[in-house]
Image: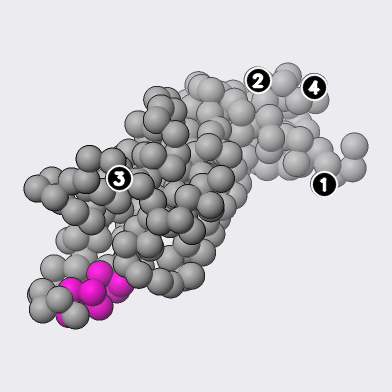
Amino acid sequence: MTGVQRRAQLLDVSRRLFAEKGFEGTSVEEIAARADVSKPVVYEHFGGKEGVYAVVVDREIQALTGSLTDALEEGGHPKVLVERTALALLTYIETSEDGFRILVRDSPVAQATGTFSSLIGDVASQVEHLLADQFRKQGQDPKTAPMYAQMLVGMVALTGQWWLDARRPGKAEVAAHLVNLAWNGLSGLERRPALTKAEIDRAG
């Protein structure tokens, strides 16, 4: 293997191990054995377990941030933005299960590159501007937008953590129920919520 190929292999192996066992439960010896290399090869590329972990987390943070930011930046009606954000997170979980398991684990090493909670906070900051505009149009106090943004994004994120293992119902149905609660509130829940047609097509 070239150096680039070896680095990529070590990252893939480490990603699987960190998802299975967490940071504390994974050793350099195990990474090396799973990759069929000697321990010095791991140290040569990453300086140790902490270095590998930091790169793995950073890659996952970038992937998820990109998905969520793209969903928000497309614009549109606020309800569609909520649908799209929920779908973006659920799609990431569906396609990057190992990555999501790593992000939702609490490890002090992740502090250098970001944690899931800090990522969710960043997304909430983007959402609060959208909510503030909507609140102004409705005559509501825009100063409450940051609080509502935390509530909304936190609800989506925690539901995503539950769905990681449950996987039932399907992604589009989970997103529809999330939006049902977020948009209609408990007193106005629809009996059979559904996404808008464009987001149903996006969910595939």
* Label 1: few (<14), some (14–19) or many (≥20) C-alpha neighbours in 10 Å: few
Q: Residue at x 10, y 75 (%)?
A: 141
| Bounds of the magenta segment | 129-136
Residue under pointer 2:
30
Q: Nearer the viewer, residue 116 or 175?
A: 175
Count of marks, rendered view: 4
Task: Return the disc, 4 or 2, that comes first in the chain's sequence.
Answer: 2
Vertical comparison of 120 with 107: above or below: below
How far apart marks 3 and 1 lie (CA) works out to: 48 Å
Q: Nearer the viewer, residue 193 or 28?
A: 193
Vertical comparison of 48 with 86: above or below: above
Q: Nearer the viewer, mark 2 or mark 3?
A: 3
Residue under pointer 1:
4
Is residue 126 rendered to the left or right of residue 102? Answer: left
Q: Residue at x 55, y 33 (%)?
A: 98
* Label 2: few (<14), some (14–19) or many (≥20) C-alpha neighbours in 10 Å: some
Vertical comparison of 173 with 80: above or below: above
Q: Secondary structure at mark 1?
A: helix
Residue under pointer 3:
193
Q: Give the amino acid type for the residue marked by disc 1 in the picture.
A: Val
Task: Return the disc, 3 or 1, that comes first in the chain's sequence.
Answer: 1
Q: Secondary structure at mark 2?
A: helix
Residue 145 in view (yes/no): yes
Q: Which labelled disc corresponds to residue 36?
A: 4
How far apart marks 1 and 2 lie (CA) works out to: 21 Å
Residue 16 image position (x, y, % from top left): 61, 28
Q: Secondary structure at mark 4?
A: loop
Residue 173: quarter of image: top left
Residue 42: quarter of image: top right
Residue 26 image position (x, y, % from top left): 56, 24
Task: Return the disc, 1 or 2, that comes first in the chain's sequence.
Answer: 1
